[in-house]
Image (cartoon, coloured by chain):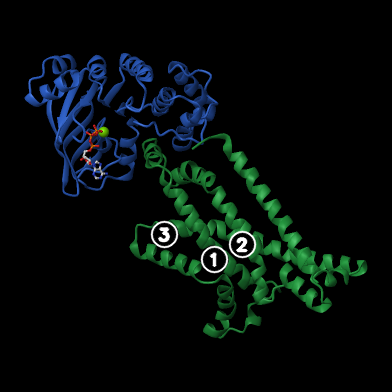
Chain colours: A blue, B green
């Protein structure tokens, strides 16, 4: 079953054409990593997918709900429904600093979906426990390490029970030791069949956690394939150059 | 030399003087609180107009702010006071509001608009200092635009703007004395009247002490709020 489809996505910033016709399908339960050189458009693509950026053309579909269709007006209801299908984890967490950890998790569902506080707190406690953050409910983000903040951000995204999670370099703002914590969490989510799209510079991690890897350069998908095959035996010249550059 | 007029004040004149000044202080305090009551929310409105997506609206508010900040407050008070008469031929006596002379309303209008302009620039700087990631996180979590502003952005803005707002508020306490120009009976006007009637500078000294105490309390209150908001960094 397709959970997310991007068809012929194009996006320019002024004269700078950043995405030239990107098409991508994500199956339910699939973990897909996007790798590629700096400036290749990975973040821009993910931001389009997360509706934070509007493509110039193309179609975005989320679990059968259209979120973008070549700039035609999407009615508000489907827009909101499409948005509720995914969660996003940012490079620099973007936690709400004035909310406690608990409130970071519960405020949005309480305020957007009007779910009773008791229920949300129970759900949040369970998630935090799972993220290894049991007992930190009343801490404020500034009192947590980067790795802990990122785990709170993942838990916050999961509170809305999204079908698919987008990650933009979830570990690149973290020290290597802290990176490990996040990788563990992502691996655990993968084991629970969570659908995830991860932009990353960590090839080893991408290889280990994903089913499929996409190599992007200059706004196009140059090559995609099974994770181990693409990393260990890339077919395309540019992919090979990129990966061997990393292994050095 | 200057102690001569001080010495001339004896005890049975001192108490009535303090009493009169206190009633003036009451008027000053009313101007102060009403100005804040109107200017703080109005500033937010102006700040959002200043950030409007329509250029004409942006320019209008930019011009408004620049005029409010670029001309003397005392002159603005005169304009608000006299413009109904000179521009619209309305006798000022017709404009009494609940039995209160129009001069009082003019003072409140003048102060509120002037301070709203200053506050709006503080709000704007505060709003622009909030990282874009906060809006994006809120968007992805499904918050509406107004929920994002009032639940996520504004609370963080308030924490950041407490120090510059404190400065303005302290200035406002002192600026209330400008209302003397419209002969509003606030503390400074009263002090001047007593001083010239009794030929003493005692009322100015007492008024100075009162202004100082007023500001001392205001600064203390703002410090209290700042402390209350110190539960997080950022
Ligand atoms: N908001 C924007 N306005 C103008 N240009 C932008 C904007 N966002 C991205 N770009 C440009 O788009 C191109 C692709 O950027 P993008 O951030 O998508 O690359 P990336 O693959 O994520 O790179 P990195 O690996 O460094 O994160 C860059 O040339 C960048 O300058
Ligand atoms: Mg990027």
Q: CA distance from mark 2 to mark 1?
A: 9 Å
Q: Which labelled disc corresponds to residue A135?
A: none
SS of the residue under disc 1? helix
SS of the residue under disc 3? helix
Q: CA distance from mark 1 to mark 3?
A: 15 Å
Residue shown at 31%/20% (left/top)?
Answer: A194
Q: For mark 3, does the 10 Å Cα neighbourhood hold few (<14), some (14 to 19), or many (20 or more) residues?
A: many
Q: Chain of mark 2?
A: B
Of the two numbered discs 1 and 3 in the rendering, the one whose residue sits closer to the viewer: 1
Disc with the residue nearer the chain's start (2 vs 3): 2
Ligand 1 picture quarter: top left
Residue shown at 32%/31% (left/top)?
Answer: A85
Q: Is residue A45 left or right of residue B127?
A: left
SS of the residue under disc 2? helix
* Residue named by callout 2: B35
Q: Quadrant of residue B15?
A: bottom right
Residue shown at 92%/66% (left/top)?
Answer: B11
Q: Quadrant of residue A240?
A: top left
* Residue named by callout 1: B114
Number of numbered discs present?
A: 3
Residue A139: percent from left, percent from top: 53, 26
Report whether residue A65 is seen.
no
Q: Which labelled disc corresponds to residue B50?
A: 3
Report whether residue A195 is seen.
yes
Residue A54: percent from left, percent from top: 25, 43
Residue A192 to residue B180: above or below: above
Q: For mark 1, does the 10 Å Cα neighbourhood hold few (<14), some (14 to 19), or many (20 or more) residues?
A: many
Of the two numbered discs 2 and 1 in the rendering, the one whose residue sits closer to the viewer: 1
């Amino acid at each position: 079953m397709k959970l997310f489809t991007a068809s012929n996505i194009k996006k320019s910033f002024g004269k700078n054409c950043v995405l030239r016709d990107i098409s991508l399908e994500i199956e339910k339960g699939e973990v897909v990593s996007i790798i590629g050189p700096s400036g290749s458009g990975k973040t821009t693509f993910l931001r389009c997918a997360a509706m934070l950026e509007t493509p110039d053309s193309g179609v975005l579909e989320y679990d059968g709900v259209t979120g973008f269709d070549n700039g035609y007006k999407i009615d508000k209801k489907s827009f909101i429904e499409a948005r509720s299908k995914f969660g996003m984890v940012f490079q620099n967490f973007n936690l709400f600093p004035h909310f406690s950890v608990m409130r970071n998790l519960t405020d949005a569902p309480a305020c957007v979906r009007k779910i009773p506080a008791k229920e949300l707190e129970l759900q949040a406690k369970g998630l935090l426990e799972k993220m290894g953050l049991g007992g930190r409910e009343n801490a404020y983000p500034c009192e947590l390490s980067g790795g802990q903040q990122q785990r709170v951000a993942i838990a916050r995204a999961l509170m809305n029970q999204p079908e698919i999670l987008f990650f933009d370099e979830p570990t690149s703002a973290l020290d290597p030791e802290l990176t490990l914590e996040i990788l563990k969490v992502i691996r655990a989510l993968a084991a629970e069949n969570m659908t995830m799209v991860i932009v990353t510079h960590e090839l080893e991690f991408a290889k280990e956690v994903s089913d499929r890897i996409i190599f992007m350069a200059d706004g196009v998908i140059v090559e995609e394939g099974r994770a181990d095959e693409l990393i260990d035996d890339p077919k395309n010249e540019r992919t090979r150059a990129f990966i061997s550059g990393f292994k050095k | 030399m200057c102690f001569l007029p001080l010495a001339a004040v004896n005890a049975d004149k001192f108490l009535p003087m303090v009493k009169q000044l206190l009633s003036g202080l009451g008027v000053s305090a009313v101007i102060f609180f009403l100005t804040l009551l109107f200017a703080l929310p109005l500033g937010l409105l102006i700040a959002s107009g200043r950030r409007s997506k329509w250029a004409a609206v942006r320019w209008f508010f930019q011009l408004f702010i620049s005029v409010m900040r670029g001309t003397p407050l005392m002159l603005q008070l005169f304009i608000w006071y006299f413009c109904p008469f000179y521009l619209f031929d309305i006798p000022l006596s017709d404009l009494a509001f609940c039995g209160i002379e129009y001069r009082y309303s003019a003072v409140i209008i003048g102060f509120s608009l002037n301070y709203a302009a200053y506050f709006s620039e503080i709000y704007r700087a505060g709003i622009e200092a909030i990282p874009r990631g906060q809006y994006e996180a809120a968007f992805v979590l499904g918050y509406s635009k107004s929920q994002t502003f009032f639940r996520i952005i504004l609370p963080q803005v308030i924490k950041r703007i407490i120090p510059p707002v404190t400065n303005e508020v302290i200035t406002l306490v002192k600026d209330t004395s400008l209302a003397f120009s419209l002969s509003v009976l606030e503390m400074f006007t009263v002090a001047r009247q007593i001083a010239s009637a009794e030929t003493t500078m005692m009322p100015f000294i007492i008024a100075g002490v009162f202004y100082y105490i007023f500001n001392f309390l205001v600064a203390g209150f703002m410090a209290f709020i700042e402390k209350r908001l110190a539960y997080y960094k950022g």
